[in-house]
Image (tube, rainbow, N blue to C red):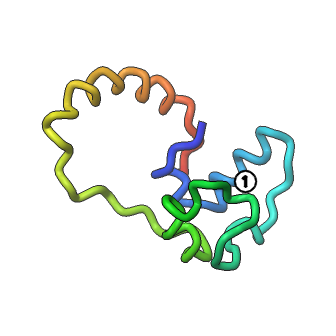
Amino acid sequence: MLDARELLLDPPRVLRELLQRIGLTFDPGMLSWPAGPRRYDGVWAPHWYHNVHKSTGFNPWKPKTDPFPAAMEPVLEACRPYYEELLAHAITAA
């Protein structure tokens, strides 16, 4: 499993481990890309991919600063055990 936080903390390490597990070879070129849309982005690209299209590589991980919506707390608590179970199998940056 990939956890976004772990990936952004150390993209080369996490990608190397992922690729090793699935039998592919890491290439440093996987850490950067040219900005802009791709022909295979799909119909949602104009609505969702603005930051992706501006990016040229992985941004450093930053903790969230916005408070979690109180109305969503029950959903968060219901999902937390499943997330914790999956997280135990995540590739870590350390």
Nearest to the observer: residue 91 or residue 69: 69
Residue 61 at x, y percent in the picture = 43, 62
Q: Residue at x 20, y 44 (%)?
A: 68
- Position of 23 with respect to 61 (left or right) is right
- Position of 87 with respect to 18 (left or right) is left
Nearest to the observer: residue 7 or residue 67: 67
- Position of 59 with respect to 39 (left or right) is left
Q: Residue furthest front?
A: 43
Q: Quadrant of the N terminus?
A: top right
- Position of 51 with respect to 72 (left or right) is right
Q: Residue at x 61, y 76 (%)?
A: 56
Circle 1 is placed at which residue position?
Answer: 16
Q: Amino acid at mark 1?
A: Arg
Residue 88 at x, y percent in the picture = 50, 29
Residue 52 at x, y percent in the picture = 55, 67
Q: Quadrant of residue 54?
A: bottom right
Q: Residue at x 79, y 45 (%)?
A: 20
Q: Residue at x 58, y 42 (%)?
A: 2
| Residue 9 seen | no
